[in-house]
Image (cartoon, rainbow, N blue to C red):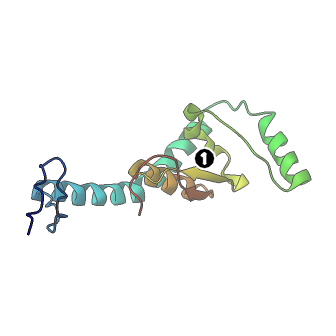
Amino acid sequence: MQAAPELSPATAIRAPRTTARRVRPGKRIRRWLAARGIAIVARVLPTLYVAYMWLVRVTSRHDDVLLTPLLLDAVERHDRAIAALWHEEVFSVAYNYRHLHGHTLASVSDFGALITAMLRRCNFVVFRGGSGSARRG
């Protein structure tokens, strides 16, 4: 009988690991605290945002003479409208256009959860998604 040829370590097939990788307790605690912190901020931040934006609106000059009538006309004529904006305009849009009940997309990340809470507080319908590799849940 012939002996089986020896395999070098590079060509040997390794058995799958049977033990799960352990997460350090400190990392587990940080994750737990982060999740609770996001949940608390997501409850408090939308109310603070609306209060702040109300203050800005009553103490500022308005310069949206054309945009609101154009959007309302498009909705009236076509039953919908699409608006695109830059990231630096996002902060004021949710409050100033809350009467339009818009639909928007927000990230599935932790920051996306905060944005979603603020947008929902301002009567927006929020879809969660994105192209990144953020945690799903």
* Amino acid type of the residue that numbered disc 1 sits on in the rendered structure: Ala
The foreground one among 21 and 69 is: 21
The image quadrant that residue 103 belongs to is bottom right
Q: Is residue 110 left or right of residue 96?
A: left
Quadrant in the picture for the C terminus: bottom left
The foreground one among 95 and 130 is: 130
The foreground one among 12 and 121 is: 12
User: Dot 1, crowdedness within 10 Å: few (<14), some or many (≥20)?
Assistant: many
The image quadrant that residue 136 belongs to is bottom left
Where residue 32 sits: x, y (%)?
Answer: 23, 60
Quadrant in the picture for the N terminus: bottom left
* Picture residue at 84% right of the left edge, 52% below the top: 75
* Picture residue at 19% right of the left edge, 64% below the top: 16
Quickly name the residue at label 1. 94
Q: How many marks?
A: 1
* Picture residue at 13% right of the left edge, 61% below the top: 22
